[in-house]
Amino acid sequence: MATWSAPGKVFLFGEHAVVFGKPGIAMAIKPRVYVTVRKARNPARVNSPYIESCFEEMGVTGSVYIHSQLPSSSGLGSSAAVTVATLFAINDEFNLKYDRNQLASMAYKIEKKVQHGRASPTDTYVSTFGGLVLIKDNKRRRMPPENFNIVIGNTLVSHKTTELVAMVSEFRKNNPLVVDPILDAIEAVTTRSMHNFHNLKVLGRYMDVNHALLEALGVGHPMLSRLVSASRAAGAYGAKMTGAGGGGCMIALCPKRSKSKVAGAIEAADGRAIITTIDTEGARKEGENGRENYLKARR
Ligand code: MEV
């Protein structure tokens, strides 16, 4: 039996613009998915195309138990985390000896197959390697970690990343003169943010700007605006939607002392709050007591 876990992710800056080759910054976050795999000749059927594809890809059969701290379909990369943790657990249980890079590529391939062609290479990369990740020239690399205090607000409004990405692409195709400057401005905010990681007030201001630019791209939602405004009023340095938009989640960058207040304001505005920070580990083997670790982390 092998238990592995993998973290979720948020985009700090640059979502959507990265689809057009612009830079972006993503970060692994503490909520994780825990997956236990055990060899089995005739395992019970699993109800997840991601997990089925993991076993298919690795050419083995086994039973699987999942415990997730990540809400699904909310833009926090839960399908990538499930896929990554499952591949690492299978690799370990069957002693297949793939390395971290190979498993990251395999996870992306599986996400693409299950999602019929479009998947975020960022989600699987961040979940595999953890930390703060710069996306530049369509490549991803880890940056030195930063201990940002982040509160996530889940709107509980489901969204479809593929549709939102297609919508922005269509908007751009028909209105390049309008959309290209918005993408350029997102690029400028992302690039400038890297020079201000220690100036949280400025970084928060850039998040506000990035949020407005995403709204200009047409991927806003009234619930996102509501949670973003509530966070700012409760003392966040800044706040923005994270991921594809159209629902899903927002993030607020907070002074340490205001985390609980911001989380309370998000809940009062009918969102679900998660107080979090960076996860530097990526996919991680859990001890014999993987399930106990999960339960401990929940307490
Ligand atoms: C979704 O989490 C982020 C997008 O930029 C899509 C992607 O990066 O693949 C909208």
Image: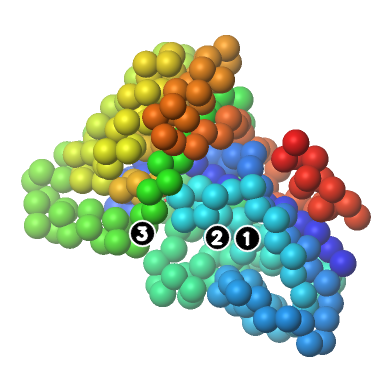
The residue singled out by tag 2 in the image is: 79
Q: CA distance from mark 2 to mark 3?
A: 13 Å
Left or right of residue 218: residue 278: right
Q: Quadrant of the C terminus?
A: top right
Left or right of residue 222: residue 6: right
Q: Quadrant of residue 65?
A: bottom right
Q: CA distance from mark 1 to mark 2?
A: 5 Å
Question: Eyeballing the image, is 182 above or below 34?
Answer: above
Q: Residues within 10 Å of mark 3 (few under 14, many from 20)?
A: some
- Residue at 19% in and 39% down: 216
Q: Quadrant of residue 49?
A: bottom right
Label whose residue precedes the other's in the sequence (2 or 3): 2
Residue 79 point in image, percent of width and height: 55, 60
- Residue at 29% in and 56% down: 164
Residue 212 point in image, percent of width and height: 25, 32
Q: Which mark is residue 63?
A: none
Q: Residues within 10 Å of mark 2 (few under 14, many from 20)?
A: many
The residue singled out by tag 3 in the image is: 160
Disc 3 within 8 angstroms of ligand 1 (CB): no
Left or right of residue 168: residue 46: right
Identify the amino acid type marked 2.
Ser
Q: Quadrant of residue 101?
A: bottom right
Identify the amino acid type marked 1.
Val
Q: Quadrant of the N terminus?
A: bottom right
Asked which secondary structure carries label 3, the reply is: loop
The residue singled out by tag 1 in the image is: 82
